[in-house]
Amino acid sequence: MTRSFWLEEGRGSLRHAPLARPDVEVVGGGVTGCACAFALARGGLRVRLHEAREVAGGASGRNGGFALRGGAAAYDQACGQLGRERAGALWRLTERALDRIEALAGDAFVRTGSLRLAADPAERSSLEAELAALRADGFAAEWEEELPPPLQGRFHGGIRHVPDGTLQPARWVRRLAGQAAEAGVEIREGSCVVSLEELSADQVVLATDGYTHGLVPALDAAVRPIRGQVLVTEPLSERLFGCPHYARGGYDYWHQTAEGRLVFGGRRDADLEAEQTAEEKTTPPVQQALEHAVRELVGSLPRVTHRWAGIWGLTADLLPLAGRIPGHEGLWAACGYAGHGNVLGFACGELVAEAILGRSAPGLDLFAPERLLQAESGDTG
Ligand SMILES: Cc1cc2nc3c(=O)[nH]c(=O)nc-3n(C[C@H](O)[C@H](O)[C@H](O)COP(=O)(O)OP(=O)(O)OC[C@H]3O[C@@H](n4cnc5c(N)ncnc54)[C@H](O)[C@@H]3O)c2cc1C
């Protein structure tokens, strides 16, 4: 019951291509690490990727499957935080990343749009402010006043984010890993890096998101692990939700798989403090709150077939850290997506690869690690 529904799908074996001496070693086999490794290999470098468990075994195979543009904050808030130009650049970066995901993911990605719903009048005002800011800057977004059952009468309208989509995230990241392996990346599953001293490459990329603990203390301090929980039901008799839906600032999110199963995640606010942990286990308070939310939404609780937890990384300003880690020669990070890493993680993995390849990486400056990291002395890599 505690295995992710996504990871249960069968997978083929990854072609193993052992390298004598890699130019770059990537730690973490989620979407970030696989995107980074693939881009580095396409750029001509010899790359070894270490994954402690299996490819997509972390948050990349345990998430809600929402592929959303933008960052964790709403667009109008990002404009206030970063300024309009930089916020616009971030949103455009993720829209391009969505296009790249669509090109690479095959049937693991469907371009459905997403629906961000207002649970009460206060949330409606927030959504109206976001919609106005998006439209003012030319981003495709629509207001949905009339909602179909079972949303009708329950929510106060919502924004349709047109470019978004739905992922089978484990299938997608395994596919990406397969493409990376085809390009020559040596993928070592079951390879937990305990110390950076073990690595021999000149350049090392830490792509561990919320599972970042023990390798670089400054990174551990800047990226806090947060637990998220999900449940999946048996297929419903009706197709009620054709795209990802989310409400209450993202504390509730749900969609239906192609076969009709309801995937419902969130309700972290049922036990907010306890969910600030790296312990990957489901808990009664949050699972009961998820069941309650499903009952409220569809009128009864269908049989629950899967429950699981995963860990994501939270930074103080809700933006990722991607780039060189100050004070460590040859050490890079791409992590801390504040629960919003399916698209951002892919984008940051590719951007860090571009920087390592010595190419321009427009947008990487948005995520400069030095803004949140204290420089530590010491050489690694
Ligand atoms: C329950 C849940 C729901 C979410 N829903 C969404 C969503 O709907 N949309 C969205 O955009 N985002 C969502 N997220 C966030 C998203 O899943 C993550 O931000 C994203 O997957 C991060 O990818 P990653 O590759 O950076 O990290 P991960 O996928 O977590 O991969 C990091 C990997 O590093 C490995 N690792 C760690 N330390 C070491 C080591 N020392 N040596 C070797 N390997 C190591 C881990 O085993 C892990 O597999 C959700 C997260 C959770 C937990």
Image (tube, rainbow, N blue to C red):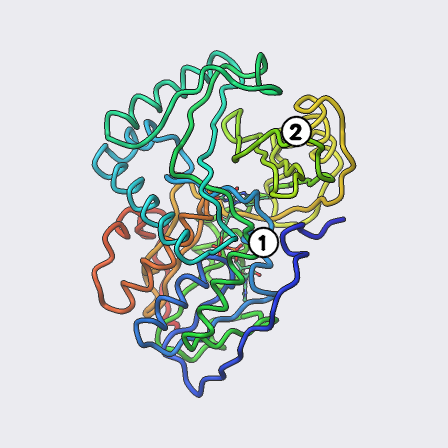
Estimate the x, y position of residue 100 in percent, counting from the top left. 36, 54
Q: Earlier in the sequence, mark 2 or mark 1?
A: 1
The quadrant in which residue 276 appears is top right
- Up/down of 379 relative to 340, above or below: below
Q: Residue furthest front?
A: 238
Residue that appears at 24% across and 39% down:
86
The quadrant in which residue 180 appears is bottom left
Estimate the x, y position of residue 65 in percent, counting from the top left. 54, 45
Disc 1, SS: helix
In the drawing, what numbered circle is on residue 270? 2
Residue that appears at 47% across and 76% down:
197
Left or right: 288 with respect to 49? right
Estimate the x, y position of residue 67 in percent, counting from the top left. 46, 43
Left or right: 304 with respect to 353? right
Name the quadrant of the C terminus: bottom left
Label 1 CA crowd tier, 10 Å (few <14, some 14–19, many 20+): many
The quadrant in which residue 140 appears is top left
Q: Nearer the viewer, residue 99 or 342?
A: 99
Q: Amino acid at mark 1?
A: Gly
Q: Which residue is mark 1?
A: 61
* Alpha carbons under labels 2 and 1: distance apart: 23 Å
Disc 2, SS: helix
- Up/down of 174 relative to 162, above or below: below
Tell how many labels. 2
